[in-house]
Amino acid sequence: MASKLPDLTVTEASLGEPGQVAVFNQNIDARLLATLSYVPLSPLNLAVAVIILLSPADNTYYVRFHALQSIIFAAGCFAVSTCLGIASSFLAFIPLLGGLAAMVLSMVVMLLWFVYMIISVKMAYDTHTHKATHLPYVSQLAADIARKFPN
């Protein structure tokens, strides 16, 4: 007696139609709000996504999903780059090869932020053109959290 598990994959159809959303008593296109969540500048990205997420409005699931996906993605990149930066700082004190290892880790951090910016621009474009914009693991976590928000 195997029970059938529900399909938890996130599809663009499950996000619903964007429509109009009221943010601070201003009607704004939901697709524009979702696109603004992916501004490729990390502090601005997080600020916009948090403002959209916590605005006293009836945000659609579509907007909440993209704001949460943006926050989780940016926070994950920030956490990884911070850990690599700390490791690089400690490696710099090791004589001879420590400096080389620290330089390599610093380059990896720069590459990570470059990739972050490229992915953010792609996700902003895809969200604006209403294509599926899902990151592995991140989109499922964002969908689970977005379902818990009250409408």
Image (cartoon, grey):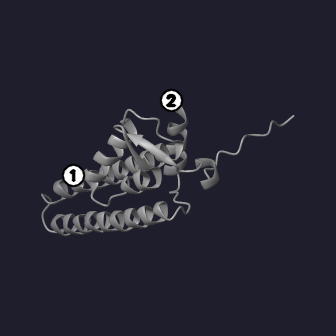
**Which residue does the image show at 43% across and 52% down from the upper left?**
34
Q: Residues within 10 Å of mark 1 (few under 14, many from 20)?
A: few
Q: Residues within 10 Å of mark 2 (few under 14, many from 20)?
A: few
Location of residue 26 in the rendering, given as x and y in whole percent from the top left corner = 36, 42
The answer to the question of whether label 2 and label 1 lie on touching residues, with beta carbons closer than 8 A, is no
Question: Which residue has dot 2 on it?
Answer: 150
Distance between the Cα atoms at labels 2 and 1?
38 Å
Q: Quadrant of the N terminus?
A: top right
User: Circle 2 sits in a helix, a strand or a loop, which is it?
Assistant: loop
- Depth check: give the residue in front, 50 or 16: 16
Location of residue 52 in the rendering, given as x and y in whole percent from the top left corner = 37, 43
Of pointers 2 and 1, the one earlier in the residue sequence:
1
Seen from this angle, which residue lies furthest right? Answer: 1
User: Circle 1 sits in a helix, a strand or a loop, which is it?
Assistant: helix
**Which residue does the image show at 34% across and 37% down from the upper left?**
24
- Amino acid type assigned to the residue bearing label 2 in the image: Pro
Q: Which mark is residue 10?
A: none
- Depth check: give the residue in front, 5 or 2: 5
Location of residue 108 in the rendering, given as x and y in whole percent from the top left corner = 29, 66
- Relative height, residue 148 to residue 139 (above, below): above
Location of residue 117 in the rendering, given as x and y in whole percent from the top left corner = 33, 65
Query: Does residue 41 appear to the left or right of 54 in the view shown?
Result: left
**Which residue does the image show at 41% across and 40% down from the upper left?**
22
Query: Does residue 136 appear to the left or right of 54 in the view shown?
Result: right
Query: Does residue 42 appear to the left or right of 62 in the view shown?
Result: left
- Amino acid type assigned to the residue bearing label 1 in the image: Ile
- Relative height, residue 115 to residue 77 (above, below): below
- Depth check: give the residue in front, 36 or 99: 36
